[in-house]
Amino acid sequence: MNQQHRLPGAAPADAELRLRAQERLHEQGRALAASTRHIDNPQRLLHELQVHQVELELQNEQLEAARAWIEAALASYTELFDFAPVPYFTLNRSGTIAELNLAGARLLGIERARVVDKRFAVFVAEPDRARLAACLKSLFSTQSDAHCEVVLVARDGTRRTVEVRTTLSNNGETCRAVVIDVSERCAAERQARRLAQVFTLAPQAMFISDQSGVISDVNEALSAASGYAPAELVGQHQRLLRCDSRSPGLDDDMSRALALHGSWRGEVWQRHRDGSVLQVTQQIDSMVDGSGATSWVARFSRPD
């Protein structure tokens, strides 16, 4: 194409595109001429051209509507992704971050633009990186959802225990990862394990029961003092450990005191598995767990 035929400001790189457009226009003109060759009446030819123009306008309206719908859907998806309260990441097979939302950037404590193209493992505590790699390997090899718990280290050094839940993307080459902060849950579980260990190893004989007195847990000291194995006591009523003939009406007294004051203390005759009895001081306190259920915690000691 000659230089003088270009539009003002057109770059040489546009020459090929313009040539293709002219060729297509020429082909469309020939097709239109062929389709109207049999039309001898100029008025009819004009009508056909007008109909064709309206068809093109309708097609253009449909394309514009489709484009508007796509743009709205993309905007909605972008808003949903960017402003979701849960951190989202898109990772490739090597664990490199391709995308992340604002919550993900906040979790890492670093600007989003500075995170893209970095490996997610960089932000994971070194002892947990192998666990993350195994999770991604399982996802891509089995094409089934995979998850793992790792410690995430933010830019300011803050450490959080997170659960990484991964799902394979449609292209099979990337995955979507939801990162959930489970630090509080893990701390509560560690606290529960510590308390359980304290209960189990406490030197004072103890058991836990429901409000009706059915034993749900015993510690080693009570098992040793009573001669019963823990499995023989769990599921049994606490009367198994007492000689009720020496303390008639004791259950009613305990229930009233616990209902009114949340605790009871008194002397009881403890019965050993071999049939011998020993007078001890029993302290029972009400305890409400995280689910709102009430239990009794009983402790035994020699009388003062």
Image: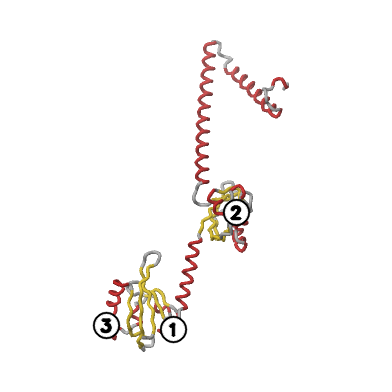
Disc 1 element: helix
Q: Quadrant of the C terminus?
A: bottom left
Image spot of residue 59 (x, y percent): 52, 27
- Mark 2 or 1, nearer chain start: 2
- Mark 3 or 1, nearer chain start: 1
Write the residue at 69% across / 22% down: 6
Camera-side mark, 2 or 3: 3
Residues 50 and 213: in front is 213
Q: Amino acid at mark 3?
A: Pro
State yes or no: discs 2 and 3 in contact (Cβ < 8 Å).
no
Label 2 and label 3: CA atoms lie apart by 68 Å
Q: Residue furthest front?
A: 156
Say if 117 sits above or below 62 in the image.
Answer: below
Q: Which mark is residue 224?
A: 1
Q: Amino acid at mark 1?
A: Ala
Disc 3 element: loop
The residue at which mark 2 appears reads as 140
Q: Residue furthest right?
A: 2
Q: Quadrant of the N terminus?
A: top right
Q: Residues within 10 Å of mark 2 (few under 14, many from 20)?
A: many
The residue at which mark 3 appears reads as 248
Image spot of residue 57 (x, y percent): 52, 24
Say if 122 sits above or below 40 in the image.
Answer: below
- Mark 2 or 3, nearer chain start: 2
Label 2 and label 1: CA atoms lie apart by 53 Å
Residues 106 and 171: in front is 106
Write the residue at 58% across / 18% down: 35
Camera-side mark, 2 or 1: 1
Say if 254 sits above or below 147 in the image.
Answer: below
Q: Which mark is residue 63?
A: none
State yes or no: discs 2 and 1 in contact (Cβ < 8 Å).
no
